[in-house]
Amino acid sequence: MRERIIDLLKGATSVLSGEELSLSLGVSRTAVWKCIGELRAQGYDIQAASRHGYRLVSCPDLLTPSEIQFGLRTKILGRACVHFDSIASTMNEAFRLAMEGASEGTIVVAETQTKGRGRLGRSWSSPKSKGIYCSIILRPGGAPAGVAPLTLLTAVAVSEAVERVSSVRPLIKWPNDLLVKDKKLCGILTEMRAETDRIEFVIIGIGLNVNSTPRQLVPEAVSLKQVLGHSVSRVILLQEVLRAIESRYIDVQKNGFGATFVAWRERSATIGRKVRFQEKGGMMEGVAVDLDSDGGLLVKLASGKIIKKISGDILL
């Protein structure tokens, strides 16, 4: 009922009386009054004018379903949304929901994670209500080899969304990091469940540092607030992220990854730079020269040989 009240207040052109709200919701005016009190306790600024009604003045920057979905207007992503104040990992919860048949586009968001994780078993710092910690369920079908380019697609889409909302243009470090001035702004984690020849589902996790302070992050990381000098609405930014991912996801299903790979190269922090990475034979160095057609990174060694790196990390 609280989410419905917020939707009604947001859509109102003037104050709404307690009677109007109670009739719309099919509950008593006492129930409406109690719910208004709960919303105020959550941080919603709702003014009450005697004998007139209620007016929504401002909303807290919480990633609740009502906040995310109001004005979202996506076809797939975010139409189903599960929100937690605190959870161990949105990735784990999204995987569990996907196993139970959750629909494509379902998102799991949390204000904080107690065991947030990144790639290769690393932990992810999740200061409460300071970042975007979101996992998305996709069911693209196709062969498992098609999962790697989805990480690149997400990186491009998140970079585009950040630029639209803040004018900051993050660059992409292959395969999954967004950088601002060579510091990590966002990490992307992709996991899947698949048969030998077909994907059952993919979970894409996004950890985006939005309003964190320097002491809340490791020295190698940065937040949008640090770059801009002011806070950014996490709701507006997440909405734009979902729109951007959905737009590119729909496009690649129709036209393939060509346009997305072009956009990735334009935003790359990797192509043309010297890179170092671990292989079975030890550390190797070379120059990143391009992406392969399946999203692998092509690296030219000092010998002139070009090898393709399809997984793991690189150092710039």
Image (cartoon, grey):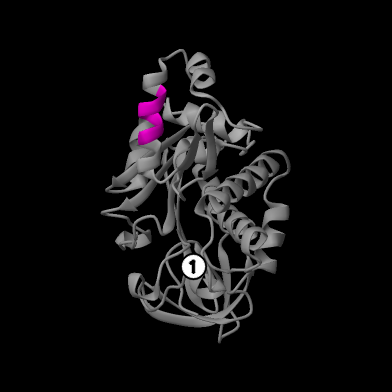
Seen in the picture, residue 48 relative to 134 is either above or below; the reply is above
Instruction: Work out whether residue 240 or residue 258 is closer to the camera in this orientation and state it.
Output: 240
Q: Quadrant of the N terminus?
A: top left
Q: In the picture provided, is 175 more to the left or to the right than 120? A: right
Is residue 198 visible in the rendered image? The answer is: no
* Picture quadrant of residue 209: bottom left
Q: In the picture provided, is 249 more to the left or to the right than 105? A: right
Magenta-colored span: 32-37
Secondary structure character of the magenta stretch overall? helix
**Residue at 46 percent of width and 78 percent of height:** 315
**Residue at 42 percent of width and 29 percent of height:** 2
Residue position marked by numbered label 1 in the rendering? 185
Q: Position of residue 126 (x, y in %)?
A: 34, 59
Q: Position of residue 293 (x, y in %)?
A: 64, 57
Q: Position of residue 82 (x, y in %)?
A: 41, 36
Q: Would you say residue 36 sits in the magenta stretch?
A: yes
Instruction: Work out whether residue 148 or residue 223 is closer to the camera in this orientation and state it.
Output: 223
Q: Position of residue 22 (x, y in %)?
A: 47, 17
* Picture quadrant of residue 300: bottom right
